[in-house]
Image (spheres, rainbow, N blue to C red):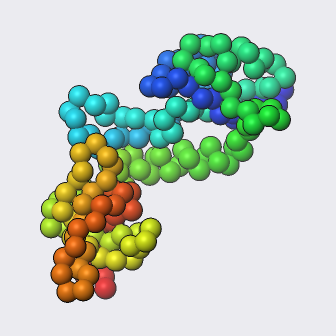
Amino acid sequence: MVSHWCVVQTKVYNEEQAAAALAGKELAVYLPRVKARRVNPRARPVVPLFPGYLFVRLDLEQVGISAINWLPGVVRLVDFGDGPVVVPDEVIEHVKRRVAEVQASDASGMEPLQPGDTVRITSGPLRDLDAVFDQHLTGKGRARVLIELLGRLTSAEVELTVLEKADLASR
């Protein structure tokens, strides 16, 4: 019996239902979740890392693909034409370690940003520029920052994920 981690696409917002249905078939399921930065207090505090997807460990010779595809909450076992996508164990272990690190650092991987905080942009066209955090942009996962260009502050919108709090003492 050789089992592999495979990717399951779930119905929108039905990751938990699909995970429970797969677990009910006595299959190992991994649904990586992280704490979310909530703008709406009624929003879910923990969300899937990969919305609409989860991992299931199964023996492709023992479990029929249709047995997976017809479970509640499941759209399909992800397949690019030559059989289900197999994810190496090392990748799953890396994701598990990374999720644990993010959860240990209070979900976002950084301290909450406050207006006036100095931040560094870590990727994109503004990479390695220092900026001043201005505000979170509601529900977009983006922020407005102020960057000094040509002697004046100019606002820019960037993804929250590309910001890190700048440690001016270490420069």
In the rendered image, the vertical position of residue 99 relative to residue 51, given as above or below: below
Task: Give the image location of residue 38, x and y in percent.
Answer: 26, 40
Please name whichever residue, 27 or 10, is drawn nearer the observer in this view of the structure.
10
Numbered circles on residues, count? 0
Q: Horizontally, is 11 left or right of 139 in the view?
A: right
Quarter of the rendering occupied by the N terminus: top right
Whether residue 167 is visible, yes or no, is no
Quarter of the rendering occupied by the C terminus: bottom left
Task: Give the image location of residue 136, x and y in percent.
Answer: 23, 53
Quadrant assignment, res 123: bottom left
Task: Give the image location of residue 75, x and y in percent.
Answer: 60, 22
In the rendered image, the vertical position of residue 24 relative to residue 163, given as above or below: above
Which residue is pictured at 56% across the width and 33% down the height?
53
In the rendered image, the vertical position of residue 93 relative to residue 41, given as above or below: below
Which residue is pictured at 32% across the width and 72% down the height?
120
Whether residue 38 is visible, yes or no, is yes
